[in-house]
Image: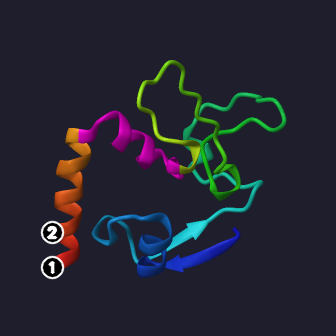
Amino acid sequence: MERVLTRAEAADEFRLMPERIGDLVVVGDADTVFGHLERLEMEVLPLGYRSHGSHHELDVPVILHNAAGAPGASYFHNNLDLARWLYPAEAAATQDVEETIAAE
């Protein structure tokens, strides 16, 4: 375990909706994966295998090919930025919901 965050800290740092997370968020270190291992069928995986993303795996390349009107690389900081660019109508609706929640 690397650290423990309060709901408010986690919501702010990870841009999460606070009502969708618990009281605390536990963040694993580079060598930790959380889960119920006794319930899962185990398989031997190569050293360095990624089970899912963590703070230690934030840099993921985005390659756009023949994308007319694509913003520059500095526009994309998170997966959310890519989704908002790919689906602008849905992003606008989501933004309206986020602003409504923030205003409450």
Label 2 sits on residue: 100
Provide the major secondary structure of the magenta segment. Answer: helix
Q: Which of 89 and 3 is in front in this view?
A: 89
Q: Does the magenta stretch include residue 23?
A: no
Query: What is the tally of numbered marks visible in this picture?
Result: 2
Picture residue at 77% right of the left edge, 54% below the top: 31
Q: Where residue 14 sits in the image (x, y, percent)? A: 48, 65
Is 30 situated left or right of 17 in this image?
right
Q: Where residue 78 sits in the image (x, y, percent)? A: 50, 50
Query: What label sits on residue 12 in the rendered view?
Result: none
Q: Which amino acid does label 2 sit on?
A: Thr
Whether residues under marks 2 and 1 lie with C-beta atoms below 8 angstroms apart, the answer is yes
Q: Residues within 10 Å of mark 1 (few under 14, many from 20)?
A: few
Picture residue at 17% right of the left edge, 49% below the top: 93
Residue that protrudes farthest toward the top in the picture: 66
How far apart marks 2 and 1 lie (CA) works out to 7 Å
The local secondary structure at tag 1 comes to loop
Is 11 situated left or right of 54 in this image?
left
Q: Where residue 84 sits in the image (x, y, percent)? A: 34, 44
Q: Residues within 10 Å of mark 2 (few under 14, many from 20)?
A: few
Look at the picture and state if 35 lies above or below 64: below
Instruction: Name the quadrant of the C terminus.
Output: bottom left
Residue that protrudes farthest toward the right in the picture: 47
Q: What residue type is labelled 1?
A: Glu
Residue that protrudes farthest toward the front in the picture: 69
Q: Where residue 95 sits in the image (x, y, percent)? A: 23, 57
The local secondary structure at tag 2 comes to helix
Rendering quarter of residue 62: top right
Look at the picture and state if 31 lies above or below 17: above
The segment highlighted magenta reads 75-88
Label 1 sits on residue: 104
Q: Which of 31 and 11 is in front in this view?
A: 11
